[in-house]
Amino acid sequence: MNDYAPWLEANDRYLAGALADLRVRLERAAQRHDTPAAAPAAPATALMETAPAVSAPAGPKHSWVARIFSGQHAPPPLAAMDADEPSAARPIVATMPGGAAAAPAAGADEGDHTPALAVLANRLGLSAFERDVLLLCIGMELDTRFPALCAQAQHDPARPHPTFALAFAVLDAPSWDALSPQRPLRYWRLLDIHQPGAQPLIGAALSADERVVNFVKGMNYLDDRLTPLLAALPPATLPPSQQAIADQLLDSLRHVSAGEPLPLVQLLGSDSVSKQAIAQAVAAAFGAQAYRLSAELLPAAVGEQETLLRLWQRESQLLPLALYLDAAEVERGDAAAAWVKRFLARTGGLAFVDAREPWASAATQALSVDVAKPTAVEQRSLWQRLLGDVAGAQPQQLAGHFDFNLGRIEQIAHSALAAAEDRPVALAPTLWQGALAHTRPALDQLAQRIEPKAGWDDLKLPDGEKALLRQIADQVAQRTTVYDDWGFRQRMNRGLSISALFTGESGTGKTMAAEVLARELGLSLYRIDLSAVVSKYIGETEKNLRKLFDAAEGGGAILFFDEADALFGKRSEVKDSHDRYANIEVNYLLQRLESFSGLAILATNMKGALDSAFLRRLRFVINFPFPGTAERRAIWASVFPAQAAVGALDFDRLARLPLTGGSIQGIALNAAFMAAKSGVPIGMPLLLDAVRTEYRKLDKPINEADFRWRESAGGKP
């Protein structure tokens, strides 16, 4: 900055003069015959009577944010500090006899450049005596003559360091309350007090905090004890829907009265990236930088918690900072919840919290807003802008199937454009695969991914059921057109989810139909593993379901709840706490299923076991009937791959066997293994043997006459 060099020069001159004055005072104390460590000439009671009035440490209400709301600019880095910064107390007066180099005159600003020590004293509320005690300790770091002078002034070679006793002896207007833990020197941790054993506080060695020394010298940076815990939020460009939220917050914050603490800003929702962008946009409007602190990094020990809190409070006085506390993964019952509440209640300044539910208590003022990802229209516009003329129909398709924030869209688009730079025809599949790849990691941990291999020709269903399946595919593909372009999303806030119930006996093709839809739409298919979701512990099932649905909200996936009656069963009469919490699980499922923006498929062979509320919320109910003779013949005719060695088969006779498609596939596979072992093609005898085995598994009655086969008789039993 252009103003930095002259300001730094003026600051150095101020420090040189102030330290020269202190050296004179120490030299005079060393020449005395009385013990400098003893109490000052005036008795302690007199000191307390003549001490300045004690004020509370400068808290959040004195922060730089308060100055913004009073019409002033946020304090810039020290390089730009000027005479507009009021001085907390006058510098050491250099009118003593002795003739040493004098400090600047009281109130002088070295050519309208306010010294950093005056800035520090003003922001942290130091009295004149407290400021000079701090300067005495800083002198130990900046002037190599100070250790010897301190030892001489205290007439003790073993004490080459400042003490409160020395400060009382050599500084003007001493005040006993400066030793109080609630006064700025100790509250803000400006000094380190080295007090071994039972040594009195007044005689303990003092040293200045390194961060404070560097601030006074002209280097303003984030305390290195906080650096490992904090991450600066990147600059953000907000879409209109999110900019409206930021403007709403700015308007509310700007109407806070000067001197009043700012309310905590609670950003609610599941998309942390969008919440961080809004927080940084609001902070930047006040000339500040927002830093993210994960709640998982908060220390468990009370002492460490207090140190972290004090350090952050101090930094918010010295730098234009805003706190973004990421508590999205902290549950109300967790051990960290109490510390999060305590931290938020005392943070002060401009602070944001990333949460799913409001954290503020009755004692904490808060502004709460719900934050969502950019709308589908905004996402489509960004896809179009990034892809340019080669976009084609991709923006609408991507915005219809995926729900990404702006950063993710930019990342996928740039990667796809770079990969398909020399092959424009590869752009569309590269974009699609890139989008799918970004949705997989979160879901892979919570559900089982099924590679869809079946197509429409593999599905042997009556025409009516096939038509319903095609309707499902069409509605998923055309969501953006109907919901956004045609305005249905603005007219409706419920019923926009697309969900279907597949009901029928086991093996009738429910899973295959889900595969067909996933393959048709180009989406990933995830089967929900009930063992990973349902928990015997109260509240854990809802947590698992929440993680599952949140991960699937990014789009690109179909959720397939097999054996859905285990999760979506009927609510029962409440007789004990287990019934009550079981009903809560069902209620939570109802809410999430209705608000889920993707395609959810429920499969069951016990339709009557489902809660009626689920049936009302389902858009499609498709019955998978037991296959008739024509369907069974078609299944038998298509069950063997083209590469398989297959002999002459009587599909009409096989079709007369009352089997489902799942059983037919199992029989074909078992017969193939028997044929491979015997080194012969798959023929009727092997198939009939496999059918007999399947019947035994299903406890079906076996008539051996139905399983005899004579090749010479053309297959007649």
Image (spheres, rainbow, N blue to C red):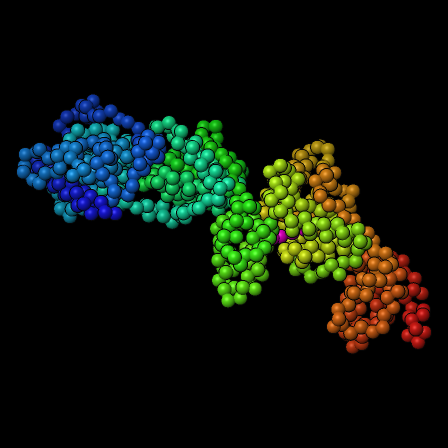
Q: How many marks?
A: 0
Quarter containing the C terminus = bottom right
**Which residue is depicted at the point 14% across and 26% down?**
42
Is residue 616 in sight in this rendering? yes
Residue 352, image x, y percentages: 44, 38
**Which residue is depicted at the point 40% across and 44% down?**
291
* 98 left or right of 310 in image: left
In depth, the one of 302 and 637 nearer the eye is 637
In depth, the one of 341 and 114 nearer the eye is 114
Position of residue 364 relative to residue 322, above or below, is: above
What secondary structure is the magenta-colored segment mainly? strand
**Which residue is depicted at the point 69% across and 46% down?**
499
* 359 left or right of 186 in image: right
Residue 494, image x, y percentages: 64, 38
> In the rendered structure, does residue 292 fall within the stretch colored magenta?
no
- Extent of the magenta region: 556-560
In depth, the one of 527 and 141 nearer the eye is 527
Is residue 159 in sight in this rendering? no
Residue 312, image x, y percentages: 36, 40
Residue 194, image x, y percentages: 26, 41
* 140 left or right of 472 in image: left
